[in-house]
Amino acid sequence: MEAKAHRHPNYVLVGVILILLTILEVSVLRLPVPQLTFLIGFAVAKGALIVLYFMHLKFDSRLYALLFAYPWPLALLLVGMLLWIYLGFRM
């Protein structure tokens, strides 16, 4: 019985993409655009690349991806509540 061969990504290419996303993040700070939206999008994209390729979740069992993704809705709810409180909720 042969083992299933995985085609591993070019880590240099993934690293270059992460560097480009970082450059775009820094560039957005100087533009008159809604910065928070762009910064959150870049952070999610960079986090997904890191998790999928450098932590090898793309090549592992889907069970690991499910266990990693399970707490995300709660974390997003918590961050949303903290932003709501910090950015203007007043009693």
Image: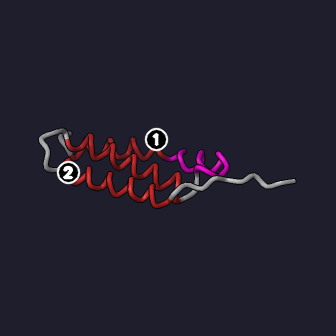
Q: Which residues are magenta?
A: 58-71
Q: Residue at x 45, y 56 (%)?
A: 13
In the rendered structure, the answer to whether residue 64 lies left or right of residue 74 reads right
The answer to which quarter of the image holds residue 87 is top left
Residue at image position (26%, 40%) is 37
Q: Position of residue 45 (x, y in %)?
A: 40, 46
Q: Give the image location of residue 90, x and y in percent.
A: 17, 39
Image quadrant holding the C terminus, namely: top left
Q: Nearer the viewer, residue 63 or 82?
A: 63
Colour setting: secondary structure
Mark 2 nearby-residue class (10 Å; few <14, some 14–19, many ≥20):
few
Query: Which numbered tag is attached to residue 27?
Result: 2
Residue drawn at (42%, 52%) of the image: 47
Tell me, for residue 11, which label it has, or none.
Answer: none
- Three-letter residue code for mark 2: Ser
**In whole angstroms, how far apart are the C-alphas of marks 1 and 2?**
29 Å
Label 1 or label 2, whichever lies nearer to me, is: 2
Q: Secondary structure at mark 1?
A: helix
Residue at image position (63%, 51%) is: 59
Nearer to the camera, 39 or 21: 21
Residue to which mark 1 is pinned: 73
Q: Amino acid at mark 1?
A: Pro
